[in-house]
Image: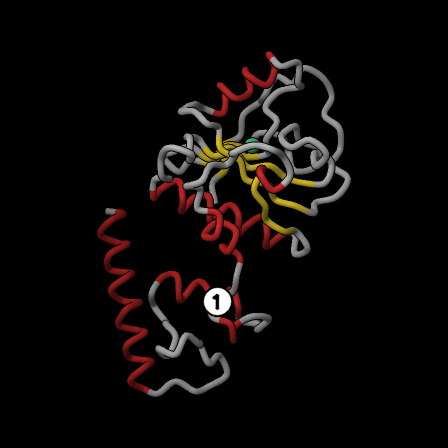
Amino acid sequence: MEIIETAWDWAGTLSGLKSAETLIFHHAAADCTAADVHRWHLSRGWLGIGYHYFVDKAGRVWRGRPESAAGAHCLGKNFSSLGVCFEGNFEEETMPEAQRRAGAELAADILGRYPAMRPARHSDFDATACPGRNFPFAELAGAAEPPFPDAAGHWALEEIRACSEAGVLKGRGDGLFHPDECATRAELAAALARLLRLCDKNTKDGA
Ligand SMILES: [Zn+2]
């Protein structure tokens, strides 16, 4: 996924992260940019933007601190967590589709790279409403779950996920993928036809 890099002017040297145990979700409680957050956090006397990522309402993902650095987003957890902040106030509004999709992709990427990491809300550790009652936590936290229970741990899990997300190859209607069963020629034809339609659509979209 695309991460927008910014050469932040840190007010000092960032400390190193000690462990990556928790992925903590926040909201900004405002409509703002990553640069706004950087300014706000500098004015609090911090080194700069305290989150590792910022996801805006258009679904763009900005890097804040590098993952190797400790954040400034959750007291007591800054040396053992990564922080992701979402533009908006999810006490009052609901998250736009583009932002949800980008957040899920980012969460799945991070959680996939740190298998022991657990997702959490800021409010799980602090007396705060952050990230807001309408924050789609289950959807974002579950982004790294296998698409079918019987695909968990399978060597082809990522290929199964890619095919099911693209709608090319689905389950058998019983909520399972049956990864080691044979496909009939009819199922193969249906999957190939969906793939051809997808390729055709992408070619036209890209033209
Ligand atoms: Zn927060």
Q: Residue at x 48, y 52 (%)?
A: 138
Q: Is residue 122 above or below residue 117?
A: above
Q: Which residue is drawn at 28% across and 54% down?
A: 202
Q: In this view, does 148 lie above or below 182?
A: above
The location of residue 191, given as percent across then percent down, is: 32, 74
Q: Does the residue labelled 1 lie within 8 Å of ligand 1?
A: no
Q: How crowded is mark 1: few (under 14 residues within 10 Å), some or many (20 or more)?
A: few
Q: What element carries label 1?
A: helix
Which residue is at the far front? 127
Residue 183: quadrant of the picture: bottom left
The location of residue 96, given as percent across then percent down, is: 34, 40
The location of residue 140, given as percent across then percent down, is: 48, 49
Q: In this view, does 2 lie above or below 153?
A: above
In this rendered view, identify the residue nearer to me: 30 or 153: 30
Q: Quadrant of ligand 1?
A: top right
Residue located beneath label 1 in the image:
159
The location of residue 94, given as percent across then percent down, is: 36, 39
In this rendered view, identify the residue nearer to me: 21 or 120: 120
Q: Left or right: 102 with respect to 151? A: left
